Image (cartoon, grey):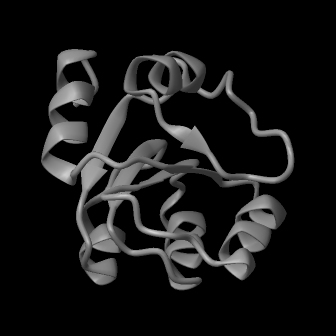
Amino acid sequence: MKLSEIISKLNVQNINRKPIRDDVTIPHAYTCDLLSQVLAGAKKDSIWITIQSHLNIIGVAVMAGIPAIIVCEGHDVPDDVIEKADEEHVALFKSPENAFQLSGKLYECGIR
């Protein structure tokens, strides 16, 4: 599924300051807050759901080949994280919903 379709279906807020590549295909999702587990378990090209909002999430996304992150439960994302996401071309989103709700919606969309 294209990232643009996921954005539309989940009604998440894009918080990047630079344009994102919304034509990227996202075949997988991964929900986890433990960064080392994301590195070990997330598949390349996944969309990652987390409550973490610090700078290290961008580094983990780049290392794991994750093109998009959803920060859930309405957590604020600091400016330096948004700037790094823009620099590394990681699409960054925010949602008031919790990880369980977002994961379920992605599953309903066929994202595994």
Q: Residue at x 82, y 53 (%)?
A: 17
How many numbered marks, from 0 up? 0
Q: Nearer the viewer, residue 95 or 39?
A: 95
The location of residue 73, given as percent across then percent down, is: 30, 58
Going 66% across and 52% down the picture, which residue do you hit?
A: 15
What percent of the width, then of the height, locates residue 69? 49, 53
| Residue in the image at 34% along x and 79% along y | 35
Q: Quadrant of the N terminus?
A: top left
15 relative to 81, above or below? above
Q: Position of residue 40 (x, y in %)?
A: 28, 71
The picture quadrant where one finds residue 19 is top right
In the picture, measured across the screen, residue 112 lies left or right of residue 89, that is left
Taking depth in this image into account, of 32 and 36 the one nearest to the observer is 32
Towards the viewer: 74 or 64: 74
Question: In the picture shown, does residue 102 fall above or below 55?
Answer: above
Is 32 left or right of 28, judged from the image as shown?
Answer: left
Q: Say which residue appears at 21% left-offset and 52% top-offset.
A: 99
Where is residue 36? Give x, y as percent: 30, 82
| Rendered position, 36 above or below 48 | below
The C terminus is located in which quarter?
Answer: top left
Q: Is residue 73 left or right of residue 103?
A: right
